[in-house]
Amino acid sequence: MLRVATIGVYGFSGESFVQRLQRADVRLLLDVRQRRGVRGPEYAWANARRLQAALADARIAYEHHRELAPTTELRQLQYAEDDRLGVGKRSRRELAAQYTRRYTTEILDRVDLLPIVVDLPTEGSAALFCVETDAQACHRSLIAQRLTERYRVKIEHLRPL
């Protein structure tokens, strides 16, 4: 059975992030961010070049799948809902219903996931990567759900230990 994990940036250091991937036997990181950087010096390790170098050292392959990233407009929609609820991006626990609906119809329904599934490692697993700690607060949970529904991929959500 094919396996895919999900993982975010928040709560990890660069070292603990790579260790968590290794502990889960992740062989391929699928970056589904639009912009491949994270604000704040504590997360500089997650900026694309540094992250790719650390993954290469750990023998973990890297692919950027921008086609699965939410548009700026969709991100702004989620931020407006966060503001309405008084939660920050780092403390969000779930996605807004309108964001979920629009991401699904505007992005996910238009992407053919089969080529990604075909390239998933048969040994170990892949990991969908974005920023939020909780998968349910991030679009990667919607991708994971689709992979499960259509391709019976087993999903595991990785969090900081």
Image (cartoon, rainbow, N blue to C red):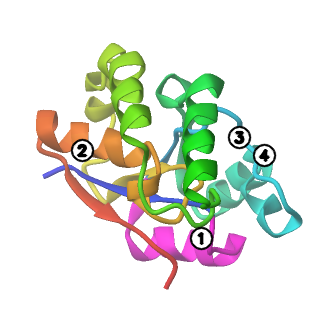
Q: Nearer the viewer, mark 1 or mark 2?
A: 2
**Relative horizontal placement of residue 157, taking residue 42 as reference (left or right):** left
Whichever of labels 1 and 2 marks the residue nearer the N terminus, that label is 1
Q: Nearer the viewer, residue 38 or 120?
A: 38
SS state under label 2: helix
Determine which residue is flagged by label 1.
17
Q: Read off the residue under disc 3.
A: 36
- Please state the horizontal and vertical placement of residue 25, each as a whole percent of the image: 38, 67
- Which residue is depicted at the point 26% across and 30% down? 118
Mark closer to the chain start, 3 or 1 = 1
Q: Residue furthest front?
A: 84
**Alpha carbon of mark 4 to alpha carbon of mark 3: how far?**
9 Å
User: Residue beneath label 4, please?
Assistant: 49
Task: Measure how far apart labels 3 and 1 are at the Cα level.
Answer: 16 Å
In this view, the mark in front (3 or 1) = 3
Q: Which mark sits nearer the N-terminus, 4 or 1?
A: 1
Residue 122, how many percent across, how many down? Answer: 25, 49
Residue at the farthest right position: 41
Number of callouts? 4
Q: Earlier in the sequence, mark 2 or mark 4?
A: 4
**Residue depth check, mark 2 versus mark 4: number of the one nearer the observer:** 2
Instruction: Name the residue that disc number 2 marks.
Output: 145
In the rendering, at what x and y percent does residue 35 appear?
Answer: 71, 35
First along the sequence among labels 4 and 3: 3
Magenta extent: 10-27
Image quadrant assignment for residue 103: top left
Pointer 1: residues within 10 angstroms few (<14), some, or many (20+)? many
Identity, as a three-letter code, of the amino acid under mark 3: Arg
Q: Amino acid at mark 1?
A: Phe
